[in-house]
Image (tube, rainbow, N blue to C red):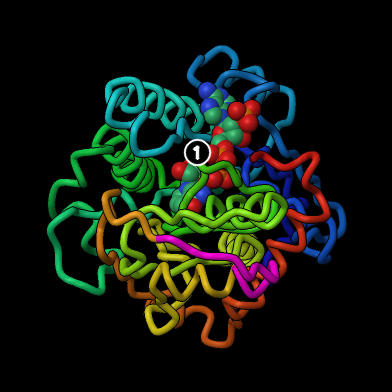
Amino acid sequence: SAVKSEPMRVLVTGASGLIGKAIEHVVFKEGGKQEGEEWFFISSKDGDLTDVEQTRAVFEKYHPTHVIHLAAKVGGLFIHLKENLQFLRDNIKINDNVLHTAHETGVTKVVSCLSSCIFPDKTTYPIDETMIHDGQPHESNYGYSYAKRMIDIQNRAYFQQHKRCYTSVIPTNVFGPHDDFSAENGHVLSAVIGKTYKAKQDGTHVKVCGTGNPRRQFTYSLDLGRILVWVLREYDDVEPLITSIGPEKEVSITEAVEMIAKALDFKGEIVYDTTMSDGQMRKTASIDKLRRYLPNFTFTPLDEAIKLTCDWLVANYDIARK
Ligand code: NDP
């Protein structure tokens, strides 16, 4: 019979962001935490993970047995274009410090976050987990992308040499409570939620960047949080796992914008600024692998998830990033 292992001590890095807040909710509010377990949610205030000594101090303080590694230097398109070198170096440092300190201190499992924006720019769709290194990432954010891809390379090496189960997930277009709702830094869905809320207050119109035609798999952060807690407990493959709503649920930006207007009861005008860049028209990701593991997982329907996010923003406007 299996030896009963000690309860997990889970360290979540980068936990002040959208995904960390979702995991925190699942763990403490939805019964995700099991008896005896301890969960620690940290941000850059607890230590700068680009610094190896500060990283070691964090691990010495919490003695984790498991790590969900979310911390990353992340930014919008324009800051990436300007600072690819900084994104490359900071993220390489953060990832090496976290993974190697985990290894040195005997952490048995690490789940790190890659991203669908690291996929090859020129590829065939749907993309799956076996294709992430098959071509160059989009040149706008190659620094961030190559640093993220190296997590997967490093995970394989820890497995090869030390039989460590350090793995990664690939979320796509996440949104939800605690996201950044500002027009400048927010991802498209949350930026539009923020703009629509303001336009309703001010009685003005909403301007959406681009044609509205690009299609995306928008994934609700709470769904992702539930999947991540499952990955931490059950997923034993070192290879990455795409953790996204299915390709059949892909919608155009326009369809998502209409759901936002409905959720916020916005009756004003919505203008598409076609002089602005659309970004990639699609980047459809396959979730066949996730479905093999979790055939019955139910994703929150997009209109419902958008409504929950809008309600959260309205109720928490004073503390929201906007
Ligand atoms: P955010 O961008 O909202 O937050 C980033 C987190 O990293 C914050 O907690 C931040 O701390 C922390 N951090 C940044 N730099 C450092 C540092 N030098 N030392 C310690 N901590 C640091 O995160 P999200 O929740 O949006 O994303 C989490 C992860 O998921 C990231 O790795 C991201 O690449 C990935 N991801 C996100 C997607 C999305 O749609 N949001 C999609 C796919 C992947 P502080 O708040 O103190 O600055």
Q: Tell me if mark 1 has few (under 14), some (14-19) or many (20+) residues whose alpha carbon lies within 10 angstroms of its own.
A: some
Q: Quadrant of the N terminus?
A: bottom right
Left or right for 11, reference 276: right
Q: Position of residue 188 (x, y in %)?
A: 46, 54
Q: Position of residue 111 (x, y in %)?
A: 52, 50
Left or right for 129, reference 297: left
The quarter of the displayed image where residue 262 is located = bottom right
**From which residue to which does the magenta span run?**
261-271
Circle 1: element type: loop
Residue 200 falls inside the magenta stretch? no
Residue found 57% across the figure and 74% down from its top: 259
Residue found 31% across the figure and 63% down from its top: 211
Q: Compared to 143, does 270 lie above or below?
A: below
Q: Quadrant of the C terminus?
A: top right
Ligand 1 quarter of the rendering: top right
Left or right for 251, reference 201: left
The quarter of the displayed image where residue 145 is located = top left
Residue found 31% across the figure and 70% down from its top: 284
Q: Residue furthest front?
A: 203
Q: Position of residue 261 (x, y in %)?
A: 60, 69
Q: Compared to 291, does 228 lie above or below?
A: above
Q: Amino acid at mark 1?
A: Asn
Q: Quick check: can you spot residue 70?
A: no
Q: Quick check: can you spot residue 115?
A: yes
186 or 135, nearer to the observer? 186
The quarter of the displayed image where residue 267 is located = bottom right
Residue found 51% across the figure and 14% down from its top: 51
Image mark count: 1
Q: Position of residue 254 (x, y in %)?
A: 42, 71
Residue 267 falls inside the magenta stretch? yes
Residue at which label 1 appears: 185
Q: Compared to 73, does 315 lie above or below?
A: below
